[in-house]
Amino acid sequence: MSRTTRPSRLASDKNIERFLRLWKNPFVERAKWIESLVKKHGWTTGAELGVMEGRVFLYLLWKCQELTMHGVDVWVQKGVDREADVLEDFNSINYGYYKNIKELSAGYNVRAITHRTTTTKASQNIEDNSLDFIFIDADHSYEQTKNDILTWSPKVKDGGMILGHDLNWHGVQIAVNELLPNFKRSGVETCWYVLK
């Protein structure tokens, strides 16, 4: 009987590096910006809402070896019931992204935590005041961005940061202006942030 072994952290590092070489900007600037904040503030726990292909999630695990990341996404095609207890989508490209992320991050063991569910349901599994930062990049509608800010902000420790992407999307812009009027533009892509 053969025994399956978990890939090492070094193997995950090399695999992620190869995977990320396939991607070009703009994600690199966004990921490097978050990496700089993680290292500057000594953050050890964060969450990305809206992981999709996993570029930022995997980059941060690779470059920030003390960081534990929660990655939240439904990883399903449009038309699949995202609120279902069991997401019945195992053949789409989005499920392929999920499988790829799980394989590439396997060597990071407990540092790479994926939540294949809605951001609202995933928030119920995260303690309040337990994260150093969140990065909001999920559903860009006004209602869902507002919901992500309201549901996930309590998860961030005092002195931590709420980060986000796609401020150029109308729904994101309205929700951020309404709920976080003191936000600042990062100067990197369409990213924004606010101190909690």
Image: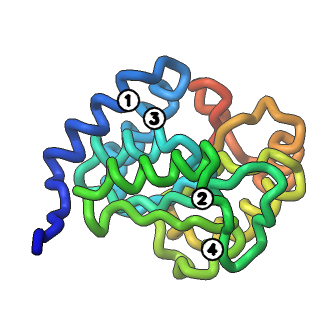
Q: Is residue 90 above or below residue 131?
A: above
In primary-sequence order, the first of circles 4 and 2 is: 2
Badge 3 amino acid:
Ala
Secondary-structure class at tag 1: helix
Label for residue 123? 4
Q: In the shown orientation, is residue 181 left or right of residue 50? A: right
Q: Is residue 25 above or below residue 133?
A: above
Reading the image, the residue beneath label 2 is 90
Coordinates of residue 101 in the picture (x, y in percent): 42, 50
Nearest the camera: 97 or 156? Answer: 97
Q: The residue under label 4 is which amino acid type?
A: Ser
Q: Nearer the viewer, mark 2 or mark 3?
A: 2
Q: Is residue 162 visible?
A: no
Q: Earlier in the sequence, mark 1 or mark 3?
A: 1
Residue depth check, mark 2 versus mark 1: number of the one nearer the observer:
2
N-term-proximal mark, 2 vs 1: 1
Residue type indicated by callout 2: Phe
Q: CB of mark 4 within 8 Å of CB of mark 3?
A: no
Between circles 1 and 3, the one closer to the viewer is 1
* Lower sequence index among marks 4 and 1: 1
Who is closer to the viewer here, 29 or 14?
14
Q: Which of the two discs, 4 and 3, labels the residue nearer the N terminus?
A: 3
**Given this view, does label 4 or label 2 mark the residue nearer the observer?**
2
Mark 2 to mark 1 CA distance (whole Å) = 24 Å
Q: CA distance from mark 4 to mark 2?
A: 23 Å
Label number found at residue 20: 1
Sort mark 2 into few (<14), some (14-19) or many (20+) by Cα contacts within 10 Å: some
Q: Quadrant of the N terminus?
A: bottom left
- C-alpha separation, residue under disc 2 versus residue under disc 3: 28 Å
